[in-house]
Image: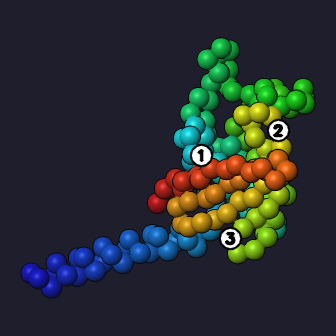
Amino acid sequence: MTSKLNLFFALLFLAAGWSAASWADDGPHGLWLTEKGDARIQVTQCGRALCGKVAWLREAIDPATGRPQTDDKNPDPALASRPMIGVQLFIGMVPAGPGTWTGRIYNGDDGKVYDGKVLFTGPRTLRVEGCVGAICGGENWSRVSSR
């Protein structure tokens, strides 16, 4: 009985280690929940760069209109009516070192584009930063488990 129990726990720990290792192997690619929990971003490889598209919104429907949320903060009238789901947030986000990408980030909350950085800090956390000059801010995104 003890050997079966030991085998069970060994397999359990092996499976847990495999799951964490496979997330690490994915690097920044996958589905991420923003720090506020109001959006999920799908991060994929686009050539040399990282792409990050809005995949889900907590409030996908605008309560005022009953229609899908739009990019209404965008100063470009042609883009202000596009649905937020599918909007590309990372622009030219290219490798800048191990686990680091730099480029530009679109912020749908204010419709502005900022110099940005994405840091893969571990299998469960992605740090996303935007800067105006020397002043930077950011948030930690959490991996959404699909396993």
Q: Position of residue 79 (x, y in %)?
A: 86, 32
Q: What element carries label 3?
A: loop
Q: Where is residue 20 in the image (x, y as percent from the top left)?
A: 47, 70
Find the distance from the CA under tag 2 to the CA under tag 3: 25 Å
Q: Is residue 135 visible?
A: yes
Q: Which residue lies furthest to the left in this view?
A: 1
In this view, 93 is above or below 111: below
Return the residue at label 1.
Answer: 34
Q: Which of marks 1 and 2 is nearer the N terminus?
A: 1
Disc marking residue 99: 3
Return the residue at label 2.
Answer: 112
Amino acid, disc 1: Thr
Other-residue count near label 2 (Cα within 10 Å), few / some / many at <14 / 14–19 / ≥20: few
Q: Please give the name of the residue rendered at 61% of the width and 36% of the height, measured from the top-left corner.
A: 57
Q: Please give the name of the residue rendered at 28% of the width and 80% of the height, measured from the top-left corner.
A: 10
Amino acid, disc 3: Gly
Find the distance from the CA under tag 3 to the CA under tag 1: 19 Å
Seen in the image, is 63 located left or right of residue 134?
A: left
Seen in the image, is 112 located left or right of residue 30?
A: right
Asked whether 133 or 61 is in front, the reply is 133
In this view, 58 is above or below 46: above
